Amino acid sequence: MFQKIILAFKTPDLRNKIIFVLTMLVIFRVVAAIPVPGVDPIRLKAFLAGNQFFGLLNIFSGGVLDNLSVVMLGVGPYITASIIMQLLTMIFPRLKEVYHEEGEAGRQRFNQYSRLLTVPLALLQGYALLIILVRQQIIPALDLFGFATNMVVVTAGTLFLMWLGELISEKGIGNGISIMIFAGIVSRIPVDIRQALFTFDLSQIQSYLAFIVVSIIVIAGVVIITEGQRNIPVSYAKRIRGTKVYGGVSTHLPLRVNQAGVIPIIFAVSIILFPGLIGNFLAIIPNPTVQVFSQRLISLLNNQWLYGSVYFFLVFAFTYFYTAVTFDPQAIADNLQKQGGFILGIRPGRPTAEYLYRVLNRITLLGGLFLGVIAVLPLIVQGALGFSTLTIGGTSLLIVVSVLLEIMKQIDAQLMMHEYE
């Protein structure tokens, strides 16, 4: 691996891309360190430590809630907008045509719709979050102008991070949004290590060893599932054109066990954060009925069994959903038929699409179950061992390992292209 990294820095184009990504991440972390005016750090720390919802929101926003930075919403509104647009493709056939059948231009239009939807979502989430923080006396009370100004600032911060993520995807390596979430998780490692060292207790040595064992198992499992694939044998018929013979070769069509990658986890967290945000927002409304409803909603979310079950189901469902959106068996079957290809023992056309659909459903079942178990594993281990540092460990490890694997694959592909040149 170190040889590949050295070789990557020796390749001018790849070196420039890596430096560009690192520069964007430095800018991201600098902006994340700029707080909104008047933050009470003591109240903020206690608030984040005692609220599981905002603790998760802090992780998946890239750690920008630690000091209530001007980009406190992170990329959450953009992710939510992407989820809504993907769901709309299942409802409106025209959107599905734009995404699948109009090529790169269609995908650019689809992404533009997601960007436009991000603005009202960021304003709505910024308003709710600022109201909660004012009520909790974490930031001082604001007049109308100050409140509107802060809403515009945090919305602009989300759009700025969205722009940085798209720049990384376009000019760098890997998916920019995933890399920024990865950077936020990694940035917390030194703080977590320091806290673990200061609070180290020999009586909890078994819990620490269990944490290490679970981490190794999760990393190994993520690598195995991410790299696992089912190879479908494909043959191409011979075609004679003039004096030349084309085709007649055998290859395979790879179907990954985890076709959706880390996206289902991000989607599920974005959805599961909404009820908590709504409950915290409704709790500040001076109406007995609304407050009773908000308290019941918050108490339901604090139920670890219910929370874990909903989280598992969302991850499992989004695994199937995102796989169905990104992989179309009918389109693959049509392309194979046009190119004279066929799967051994399967007729071309619709039978091929049905076969691919059955195989994809079976292997996605394993991938979805694995992602769901990884998502709720920290809750199970925490309940068994009482070790609070494992609250988000499984999801964090899943994202970190998956993003690193994707980056290494892209670096390998770039190096291979350079060798061919």
Image (cartoon, helix red, strand yellow):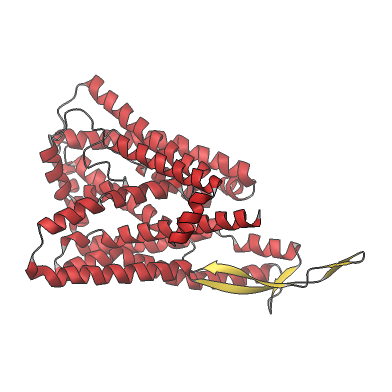
- Residue 413 visible? The answer is yes
Identity of the residue furthest to the bottom in this view:
345
Residue 131 higher or lower than 219, as above or below: above
Query: Residue 90: x and y, percent?
Result: 52, 52
Query: Residue 78: x and y, percent?
Result: 41, 42
Viewer-closest of 30 and 94: 30
The quadrant holding residue 119 is: top left
The quadrant holding residue 376 is: bottom left
Identity of the residue furthest to the top in this view:
145
Lateral position of residue 312 relative to residue 101, left or right:
left
Q: Which residue is drawn at 54% across and 49% down?
A: 11
Residue 1 higher or lower than 75, as above or below: below
Viewer-closest of 401 and 230: 401
Lateral position of residue 79 relative to residue 253, left or right:
left
Q: Residue at x 19, y 37 (%)?
A: 132
Viewer-closest of 348 and 375: 375
Q: Residue at x 73, y 68 (%)?
A: 341
Q: Residue at x 74, y 72 (%)?
A: 249
Lateral position of residue 28 relative to residue 109, left or right:
left
Lateral position of residue 41 relative to residue 56, left or right:
left
- Which part of the image, by quadrant, shows the N terminus? bottom left
Query: Residue 85: x and y, percent?
Result: 48, 45
Query: Residue 5: x and y, percent?
Result: 46, 56
- Residue 286 visible? The answer is no
So how many labels did they put on this image? 0
Residue 308 higher or lower than 290, as above or below: below
